[in-house]
Amino acid sequence: MQTWAKRGLQTAFVTGGLLMLGTGIASAQENVDPDAAPPAVDVAASVPVKADQNKLATPVKELTVPKVDRTISTDRVTSAVPTRTAAPVANPLIRQAGERLQGTALQNLVRGNTVQAHVDVPINICGNAIAVLANTEATADCTQETHRDGTIVTDGAGQALAGNVVAVNHILPVQITGNAIAAGGNAATQADASQVSTTGGDITTNGDKGAISGNVVAEQGATPVQITGNGVGAAGIAEANSTADTFASSEGDVLTSGKSSSISGNAVPVPLAPLFEVNGNAVAGAANATTDSVQTGAAYAGGKTDTNGDPATLAGNVVAPALSGPITVDDNAAAGAGNATAVSDTTNDSTAGGIIHSDGRGSTASGNIAGVPVALPTSMGGNGASIVGNALTDHSNDSTSKSGGEVYTLGDKSVLSGNIADVPPATAVDACGNGATLVGQAAGTCENDVDSVTGGYQGTTGNDSVLSGNLAQTPLAAPAEVYGLAAAAGGQAAGSAHEIKDVRSSGQPNTQDDNGTVASNVVTAPTAVAPQVFAVTAGLVGNTTSDTTNDTSVVAGDAPKAYGKKSSASGNIVQVPTSTPAQVFADGATLVGNNATTADNATDMKAGGDALTTGEQGSIAGNVISAPVATGTQVLGWSVGGGSNVNSAATNDLDSVAGGDVNSNGDGGSVSGNLIGAQPAVLPAVPGNTVSAAGITNSDVVTDTNVVSGGDSFSKADDASVSGNLIHVPATAAAGVYADAVAAAGNATTVTDKTSNTEAGGQMLTEGSGPLSAREMTVPVEAAAKVARIPVEVVGQATTLGTSDDTQLTGEDAGTLRATQLKGLELPKGVDSLLKANEVPAFHGIDSLDKLPVNQLPNPADLAAMTGQLPTPALPGVAQERSALPVNGGTAGLTPNVQGLPLGQVLEAAQGLIPAGATARSLPAVPSLPVTAPALPVPVQLPALPTERSLPALPLDGPASISGLNLNPTQGLAPAAGERSLPQLPVAAPAMTLIDPAHLFETVSGSL
């Protein structure tokens, strides 16, 4: 072969080989194979930095800071990218090492297990102006975007120690834009900035039929930091006009499964989505600082979690903490020997976590869920403070925080499975719209709209299980804040806030169990608390004003439900809901000065709800222990002044409710369907007091409070044992020191209209049969005390005006008989053996009846003495005759009370007909028969003798009892709302008049 040909072929082979090698390297570098397994270890961190359009001025020169657009990472350092800085996908060395294990004997060491850690910190510095003994101005329009994919797909099904995932996908963007700082000079900025940072992705694995497989631990974090639109002046002038938006996301679902496995398919998602912001603040020291800013922020982390432990051992369990909520210091103004003005509009949205679903049916210690979602929005905004200066703010804040979500699991036919534990605190901490000054002027203005929500519905089951399907939760809803306050010493201060707040913690707990053991029980302790101080003013040789409104809703937990039919120690509920507001508002106090405060408060608080369960045909099932606590602590509308004018005005509408109705059923059960409750409701009312010393004070208050603890209780227990019982201790305490006026060398006036309802417990109803069943016991406790509308004058004028309408209900309504008391006329068993056929009752204690002779003619004088002693027009109905006549003179005790009896007719009809030997049986005395009645008409007939089992019908206005025996229990009763009408005894029953005596005795003797 020619030399040139050989060399040509060699060149071709070498070139082709190099091309093939390059292609292979490129393919490996790009990881384009979609079916390739993820690397066993993937660790990467990056810091994309973008700085542009920043100004720095000194006496020497003004310069524009050089532009920077670089990414510092574990992978590489990139050059400038115009619009998008791409975070690296993975560390090449680690990725290549993992890929080389594929298809080798060492691959079995990996088995789809994955460790991934991605942390990115994008930094955007833009449009800032700094002036030192010089002047400068910056104008900027800047954006930054970063993204890293954290999606994981692996599999450990049918294997041991396989498909497990440990992942960290965290994004922490930092935005520093539009700030102006002036020291001995002037600095101004006009900036518009946007930052978008995303990471994360779904994590999917599987541990079915595996051992220690398919487990996931995943931190998903989106925690943006914003420092924008601030103005700081020191012996200079700083002006900042800024618009800034930050968006951070580390979202992704966690999907795994541990069916038919051991220690598999468990998940621990950790979503974190707080925002940290310092925006739009103005600070001036011997200078002027002005800010006008608009900022928005959003952080989203995590997603839904779905796993399965059916059937399995220690599988499909979930532990899920979550954190959301912006933490902001925005739009505050502080001035010392200077002027500071801050105008700002802030909007934030934060969400962490989501729905959780698992399944532990037919398993052991599987499908359990523990959640700790926390929502913690915290803001300090719109406050003004000055010392020998002026500070003014105008702030608007709109914040939404949501952590966790609904929870579902199943624990049927299992052991220690399908249980739920939930600790979901939701709060909101705010200091907003306050003004304070020392020898200056300060005004804080704030509009604040905050939603803070954690968790949601909690549902599980425990049918045919042991220690499964139980649910425990401790919801906490607790806003804590101060807003609309004003304080001045040697100056003037104003505070103004308009707040709308909704704080909700968790949702309804619901569990169901049939044929279970220690299953489907609910323990819940929801707490709604609201420590709030607003529209409070104080002055010392100064003037203060406040105008504040509050609309707050605080809800902790919801109505618990449980079912324990045909079960043992199941379906029981223990709930301890508390609703305890602690509010101080519309109070003013000044020593030498002028003070005016106005507040409008509408607060709704609710902890827990109605409890519903059943323990039918169960043992220790369907019982409820309920201990709600409701209070209404408020201090409002006070005016206190010394050498000053103080005016306080307040309108108040408070609802504080804990618990609700309780309903159960213990039919056919043992120690089931019992309801035990203690329900305290406390209202310490102290509105509208005023005190004046050498001044003028006025309080004008309209307040309406509703404090309710617990509700009605219903149960039943047919054919049961120790079941369906009600034991309640409702307690109310209403104490008040209100609408009092004290004047010493001054004028004090209060006009207070007060309406209140304090209520504990409610109606109680149970019914059933069986030993120690369907019993009812209530021990109401009630206390009330007040010191109200008392004028105290010491060389002054004290005036108290207004109205009061207070209701205090403890347990059942007073004077209302419930169905458990409406037993009717009940004769003891064996009454027939006590009252023989030849016996008739003797009515002892009725003196007038003893005056009628039985076996002799009546004395007309005795009859005349009885005039007017029988009730008319309706006399007792006449019962049928007995089957046998009384004997042995037993009619001696039967002495009808009549007047104007025709003696000749009686003698002719009765002679020889009254048998001797009848003995008189004693019946209880009748202490309450009427003493006057019109005379009976003549002639009158005698009634027939009573027969076995019969008693005469009573007249409407006749005796209600005989020696305590209730003869007409329905008399005077009207049915309560929702009750059926009770049967009434006949009113116009056959009377003793109109009875033919001849016919009567003919019936008795057989002939006349």
Image (tube, grey):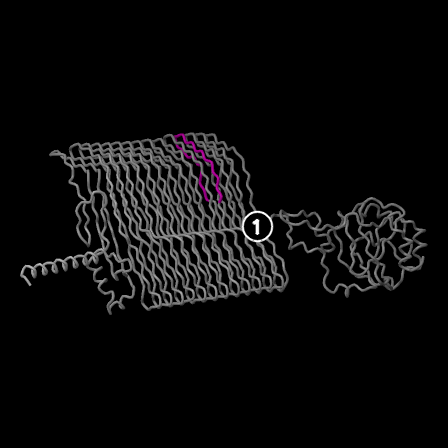
- Residue at the spot 63% in from the left edge and 60% down from the top edge: 768
Position in image of residue 625 (x %, y %): 51, 57
The residue wearing badge 1 is 762
Q: Looking at the image, which is closer to me, 776 or 212?
A: 212
Residue numbers of the magenta segment: 633-655
Q: Is residue 208 above or below residue 237?
A: below
Position in image of residue 290 (x %, y %): 26, 33
Task: Determine the main secondary structure of the stretch shown in magenta.
Answer: strand
- Residue at the spot 46% in from the left edge and 48% down from the top edge: 579
Q: Is residue 337 in sight in this rendering?
A: no
How crowded pointer 1 is (Cα within 10 Å; few <14, some 14-19, many 20+) is rated as many
Position in image of residue 656 (x %, y %): 48, 45
Mark 1 lies on a secondary structure that is loop
Quarter in which the C terminus is drawn = bottom right
Position in image of residue 1007 (x %, y %): 94, 59
Residue furthest toward the left?
Answer: 3
986 to the left or right of 22: right
Please say whether residue 373 is one of the residues in the magenta stretch. no
Q: Is residue 185 above or below residue 854?
A: above
Q: Quadrant of residue 178?
A: top left
Q: Looking at the image, which is closer to me, 776 or 67?
A: 67
Q: Is residue 932 in sight in this rendering?
A: yes
Q: Amino acid at mark 1?
A: Gly
Q: Quadrant of residue 591?
A: top left
Labels in figure, total: 1
Residue furthest toward the front?
Answer: 1
